Amino acid sequence: MAELCKMDCCKNCPRWAECPGCSETGGRPLGGDCVAAERVKAEGPEGLAALKAALIGEINGLGIPDLHVDDLNLLPGYYVNLEYPLPNGQTVKLLRDENIYFGGQIERPFGDRCYGVAADAGYILVCEYACGADPEIVLYKRRREV
């Protein structure tokens, strides 16, 4: 399988056996948008590198204690799209399962909680959770691209 972005995400995807791949689907391997494929199609590899660097800079500049990222990986939405409890007792998912996002997990130095980060060209989501359980929204913001 060939990937438009050349980031080797297909080989790490648990659904690779059932997926025709990025090139075959025009950058929509799960049926939704892929942040990397969309940027490569619009601006080429340089545009993708610029977006990734901008997201890393924005995330590190949020001022959230213990949150620092050196790199972001491409992650399928179904893998990072947690259900967050709301004050009214309902739950909400903020991402789309069929999209592919830049993201990562950052372990906090004390305790058993981690930060989860997911971002695309339009939004940044930072959550905190304990081994995938008890997720809490730390920040969800719209990006203003320059």
Image: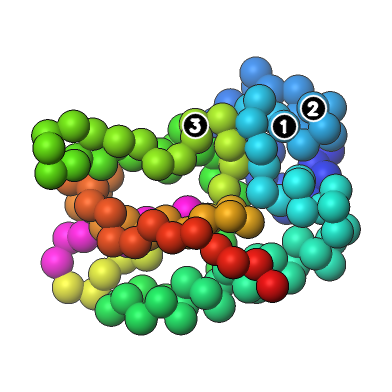
Residue 25 badge = 2
The residue positioned 13% from the left and 44% from the top of the image is 87
Magenta-highlighted stretch: main secondary structure?
A: strand
Closer to us: 11 or 45: 45
Measure how far apart labels 1 and 2 are at the Cα level: 5 Å
**Secondary element at image label 2:** loop
51 vs 40: above or below: below
Closer to us: 115 or 141: 141
Residue 23, magenta (yes or no) = no
Task: Tell me, yes or no, if residue 68 can be seen here.
Answer: yes
Type of amino acid under label 3: Asp
The residue positioned 65% from the left and 67% from the top of the image is 145
Crowdedness of circle 2 by 10 Å Cα count: few (<14), some, many (20+)? few
The residue positioned 23% from the left and 34% from the top of the image is 91
115 vs 99: above or below: below
Q: Which residues are magenta?
A: 111-118
**Looking at the rendering, in which quadrant would you find the N terminus?**
top right
69 vs 35: above or below: below
Type of amino acid under label 2: Thr
**Residue 80: where, in percent of width, then height?**
42, 42
Measure how far apart labels 3 and 2 are at the Cα level: 17 Å
Type of amino acid under label 1: Arg
Residue 114, magenta (yes or no) = yes
Residue 97 badge = 3
Q: Is residue 12 left or right of residue 117?
A: right
The image quadrant that residue 138 belongs to is bottom left
Q: Are marks 1 and 3 in contact (CB under 8 Å)?
A: no
Kindly identify which residue carries mark 1: 28
Task: Tell me, yes or no, if residue 11 can be seen here.
Answer: no
**Residue 37: where, in percent of width, then height?**
76, 46
Mark 1 or mark 3: whose residue is earlier in sequence: 1
Mark 3 or mark 2: whose residue is earlier in sequence: 2
